[in-house]
Image (spheres, helix red, strand yellow):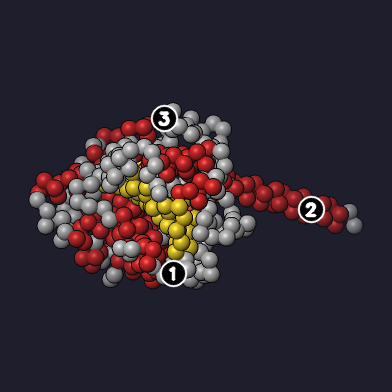
Amino acid sequence: MTNQEIVAKLWNLCNVLRDDGITYHQYVTELTYILFLKMAKETDTDSQIPAEYRWDKLAGQQGTDLKKFYNRLLNDLGENSTGRVREIYSGARSNIEEPKNLEKIIKSIDDLDWYSAKEEGLGNLYEGLLEKNANEKKSGAGQYFTPRVLIDIMVKLINPKVGEVCNDPACGTFGFMIAADRYIKDQTDGLLDLPVDVQLFQKQKAFTGCELVHDTHRLALMNAMLHDIEGEIVLGDTLSNAGKSMKGYDVVLTNPPFGTKKGGERTNRDDLVYPSSNKQLNFLQHIYRSLKSDNQARAAVVLPDNVLFADGDGANIREDLMDKCNLHTILRLPTGIFYAQGVKTNVLFFTRGATDKGNTKQVWVYDLRTNMPSFGKTTPLKVEHFAGFMQAYTAQDRSSVQDERWNLFTREQITEKGNSLDVGLIRDDSVLDYEDLQDPIESGEEVVAQLEEAVDLILSVVKELKSLGGGK
């Protein structure tokens, strides 16, 4: 049985829980609680779990006893265990109401072909589950999910090296860092080519992140653990003052969440020179400030079009970016690769300078958007679509590349445009601004409210019709 088949089986188990009203995202979180125990057993690492809560004890329970045992297990592991176990189960609670459903899920997991899963890698299995969740529109997880092909290309071009500290300040389920770790492992025979102390550094220090949402943080911890990564993954808000200490990185790879700061949210960092209501502009400031000032530290960041042309603080932030960093490349991404159709995005590639002034002399822009298909489930994004860009990016002499999509803009030309980086494309007035997108939770609640209103209206009409019928 392949990992793909195991993922499909695990995913289909979600149907068992429909009567409990569980969402796909809640299901993946619930699966994480259960899979952690099973995978610990399969990898002989269950010594970190108290003996009374190991897999065989859980699998031996039935009915209401199982439900009580499981709830006690979640509570105790979250409060009384240590290390990653405590982090993963912190604040955990079950959404499964029916004991028979819990029993069925545990039995189904126990019956899977774990030998095959281990051969392919449990980390790959879990990544497959996370990807399935992101691709399922009903899960609501896709809004922050970066396509694997784009992650791998960004990692390859940024070229993380052994001994460097990498970070994702909005890490989601830790996809960028997993890919960066895999990239280095592929070049070092799974780190075995390295001295023991360097292997330890790669495992414990090289890959770090920060995630705001508790359940997503849990998934990130599990994902990292299954890929044998022990770097710090902070539960918190990079854009709060807690983010001030997140600095000194060699590499940053990230796709910050969209949205506008609303009243009542945490105050902006007091060390950001140009605090903005636009989250991406704040993240961009944090990222280039978090890099080492050594002419080598570098970043690749996915950002929406509005970051390229926003006035006011936006223009100041772009000027500051081009002063402190060499913004050498912008990739204008095709539409449809993220969940909100019509959203226009880009990847900015830059290197932090040793000084704080005049680091950007020119910017190369590759237009992978114009006359490209709109990507989605029917037209998946593939590595071949990036062939022209990869060739242009890696060319020894970029000016020798003959490709109409590849264009150079001097710093002077950009200054003349008011520091707008909306270059290399004809401005598309159909652009859907990330700022205009509602928070997915808010928009979901709005839809529910509208549906409830419609139901009330229908019921009142039915009532009226019944009363009219009764009067005849």
Q: Position of residue 226 (x, y in %)?
A: 25, 53
Residue where numbered disc 3 is placed: 271
Q: In the rendered structure, which amino acid carries the disc numbered 3?
A: Asp
Q: Quadrant of residue 380?
A: bottom left
Q: Which element carries disc 3, helix, strand or loop?
A: loop
Mark 2 or 3, nearer chain start: 3
Mark 3 or 1, nearer chain start: 3
Front position among marks 2 and 1: 1
Asked if residue 389 shows in the view, the reply is yes
Q: Position of residue 325 (x, y in %)?
A: 37, 44
Front position among marks 3 and 1: 1
Placement of 128 over or under 37, stated as above or below = below
Q: In the rendered structure, which amino acid carries the disc numbered 2?
A: Val
Placement of 376 over or under 285, stated as above or below = below
Asked if residue 33 shows in the view, the reply is no
Residue where numbered disc 1 is placed: 403
Q: Residue furthest front?
A: 412
Front position among marks 2 and 3: 3
Q: Residue furthest top?
A: 270
Residue where numbered disc 2 is placed: 461
